[in-house]
Image: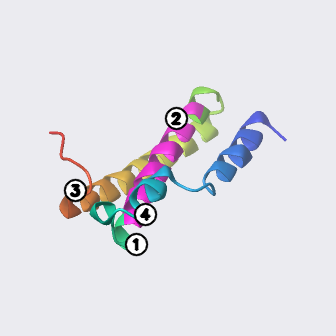
């Protein structure tokens, strides 16, 4: 198993862990209550951010042109998904519009 396969397997395991987002917003306090859909959007943002960082780290360690192209396409796809979820979260007022 290559170091990238090992890293991918380890990364996949982290995605199954409970998100800190859900832990913060599902406490008993009524002011922090969010709908299940809102929690899913926030969790998706967090997971996509981790996926993007992981793909960038993998891209840094490879030299094969085909793998480089593959990671570039993967980074672009993840970035587009992230932009979609970020826009939806902004529309719902879940995250601040920084700019």
Q: Which of marks 3 and 1 is nearer the N terminus?
A: 1
Q: In the image, is 25 to the left or to the right of 58? A: left
Q: Where is residue 48 in the image (x, y as percent from the top left)?
A: 46, 50
Characterize the local packing of mark 4: few (<14), some (14-19) or many (20 or more) Cα atoms within 10 angstroms.
some
How far apart in space, not on screen, are marks 3 and 4 (Cα)? 20 Å
- Seen as rendered, the residue at the extreme left is 99
Which residue does the numbered mark 3 point to in the structure image? 90
Q: Earlier in the sequence, mark 3 or mark 2?
A: 2
Which residue does the numbered mark 2 point to in the structure image? 56
Q: Main secondary structure of the magenta part?
A: helix
Which residue does the numbered mark 1 point to in the structure image? 36
Q: Where is residue 70 in the image (x, y as percent from the top left)?
A: 57, 45
Q: Which of marks 1 and 2 is nearer the N terminus?
A: 1
Q: Earlier in the sequence, mark 1 or mark 4?
A: 4
Q: Earlier in the sequence, mark 4 or mark 2?
A: 4
Nearest-to-viewer mark from 1 and 4: 4
Which residue does the numbered mark 4 point to in the structure image? 26
Classify residue 94 by image quadrant. bottom left
Q: Does the magenta stretch include residue 17?
A: no
Nearest-to-viewer mark from 3 and 1: 1
Which element type, helix, strand or loop, lies under badge 3? Answer: helix
Which element type, helix, strand or loop, lies under badge 4? Answer: loop
Its colouring scheme is rainbow
């Amino acid at each position: 198993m290559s170091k990238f396969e090992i890293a991918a397997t380890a990364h996949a395991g982290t995605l199954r862990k409970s998100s800190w987002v859900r832990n913060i917003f599902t406490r008993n306090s009524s002011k922090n209550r969010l709908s299940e859909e809102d929690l899913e959007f926030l969790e998706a943002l967090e997971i996509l951010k981790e996926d993007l960082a992981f793909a960038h780290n993998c891209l840094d360690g490879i030299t094969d042109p085909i793998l480089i192209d593959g990671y570039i396409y993967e980074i672009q796809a993840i970035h587009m998904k992230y932009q979609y979820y970020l826009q939806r979260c902004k529309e719902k007022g879940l995250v601040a519009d920084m700019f």
